[in-house]
Every structure is written in structure tokens, then in C-alpha cells.
Amino acid sequence: MDTNSPKSKEQFVHSVFESIAPKYDIMNDVLSFRRHKAWRKFTMKKMNIQPSNTAIDLCCGTCDWTISIAEASQTGNIVGLDFSQNMLDVGKVKVDRANLDRQIELIQGNAMDLPFEDNRFDYATIGFGLRNVPDLKRTLAEMQRVVKPGGMVVCLELSKPTWQPFKGIYYFYFQKILPMLGKILVKRYEQYKWLPESLAAFPGRYELADIYREIGLKDVQAYPLTGGIAALHIGIKER
Ligand SMILES: C[S@@+](CC[C@H](N)C(=O)[O-])C[C@H]1O[C@@H](n2cnc3c(N)ncnc32)[C@H](O)[C@@H]1O
């Protein structure tokens, strides 16, 4: 699969998520050994959302994080944005089931070109999405643009463990076993092979923190999660 040009990467990623949407949540639990739940919990704690805070959740997919943010904010308007209608459809069922349909607005759109004015939200978040966009700096810059001065740009994403022997064992699982599980469990080999491929081209924890600073975000914090297989990055828009 040619994912070298920005357009073909975007089209390929779109087709991946359109195809795996109905099985995305269950596969997330299986493939991460449910670790993603702990990572999301830790992230929410660090975000410290207050009642009535507003947020945009980019690449919201099936809306797990969007829903947690809405619940923490209680009354604030929360936007979930994703370019896969199939992922949004799964998310919409969950939003309705949680009775959050008046608080959460779901929009089909591109993370690199947000349809909102500057300084609109208290938070901009992206969960396991930044690895998938063709231009991560542009996406982070868009997040920075739409948050208010003092607002938070938050990225929860897979990352690169550095210490052996954990690193070796993890990469064996991630590169060899995980795509096979995708093939066996949901008949999607190419789609799950994309996961390790997308991480290979993605910056490590320190590099991503540097990119946060490069685009002008302040007080940048980067937390390794589960031995560095994921990382949480937080930056604040200058007041
Ligand atoms: C791995 S899923 C993450 C879903 C969700 N945030 C979560 O934490 O489970 C990545 C999502 O990013 C979306 N996505 C990828 N590139 C995008 C883009 N350029 N614009 C909008 N959504 C995009 C995909 O459709 C998919 O739903």
C-alpha cells in the first residue's frame, strides 16, 4: 500500500477506519489488553476538566474519549470530529445511549482543517489519531488555533518504548502478532498491519514534545505510559 503521498495516506487511513468501524472497540480492548482504558483515565485526571468547559475531540472515532470529556464537563458543549462516517455512526449510538446527544455534536471533517473560529474551546484533544494524519504539525497547529489562550492541547497516542528487553518483546508482538490477530479475529490483515507501520514514521515522546514547543505551545508535559508504548502530551496555548 502506497502511503507516501499525503493524499494517498489520507485515503488509505480513511478506508481502514471505514472498514474496521464495527469491530474497532472490541479490537481496541483485545489488542491493547485493555490498557487504553487506564491511559484514558490517567489523561482525564491530568486534564482536570471543570464543569461547563468546552472541547473539541479530533479523530474522535467511536467517541469513548468524547463521552468521558462531556461527562466531566457536565454542561459544556463538546464537539467530536472524524472523517470516517462509519466510526461516527458507532460513536453516535454510544452518545445517544449515554443521553449526551444535546451536549455532544458530532461532525464529519478533517483534523487538518477545523471548521471553527480561533479561540473557541477550552480543550482540543486527539486520541490515537495524530499518527494517522498526513501532517501532524498542521493538525497540532489547528488544535492550538481553536483553543482559547490558556487552553490545553492534548494528545494521547502510541509511542516508542526504549528499554530492552521490553522493547524487543513489545515490537515482536506489535509487528508480527498483532496483524495476525487482526486477520484471525476480524479478517483484516492489511488494516492492522497499518498500526506498526504508522508508528514507525511517528516521532518518539521527546521529539513530539519538541514539536509541541516548536509550534509555540507552553508548559509542555510528556508522560510515558506502560513502559513507553503510549504517551500523553499536554501543551498550553500562550495567554
Ligand atoms: C485509532 S482511531 C481513534 C479513535 C478514538 N479517538 C479513540 O481514542 O479510540 C483514529 C481515528 O482517526 C480518524 N482520522 C484519521 N485521520 C483523520 C483525519 N485526517 N481527519 C479526521 N479524522 C481522521 C479515523 O477515522 C479514526 O476514527
Image (spheres, grey):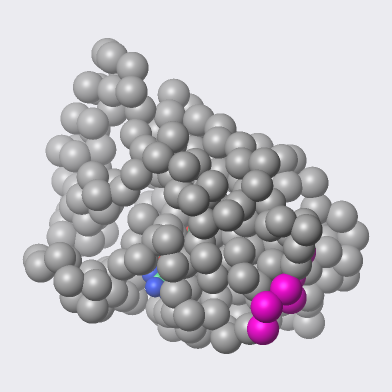
Q: In this view of the protein, which residue sits in the foreground, 189 or 193? A: 193
- In the image, residue 74 sits, relative to residue 128, either above or below, namely below
Q: Is residue 193 visible?
A: yes
On the rendering, which quadrant does ligand 1 occupy?
bottom left
Residue 4, quarter of picture:
bottom left
Image coordinates of residue 108 in percent, x first then y, are 50, 84
Magenta stretch, residue numbers: 117-122
Image coordinates of residue 23 in percent, x first then y, are 38, 63
Q: In this view of the protein, which residue sits in the foreground, 144 or 179? A: 144
Q: Residue at x 34, y 34 (%)?
A: 160
Q: Residue at x 71, y 40 (%)?
A: 46
Q: Is residue 24 visible?
A: no
Image-based side of 169 in relation to 189, left or right: right
- In the image, residue 155 sits, relative to residue 124, either above or below, namely above
Predominant SS along the magenta part: loop
Q: Residue at x 28, y 28 (%)?
A: 170
Residue 38, quarter of picture:
top right
Residue 137, quarter of picture:
bottom left
Q: In this view of the protein, which residue sits in the foreground, 92 or 210? A: 210
Image coordinates of residue 49 in percent, x first then y, are 80, 53
Q: Residue at x 16, y 57 (%)?
A: 189
Quarter holding the N terminus is bottom left
Is 109 inside the magenta-drawn segment? no
Image coordinates of residue 139 in percent, x first then y, are 47, 67
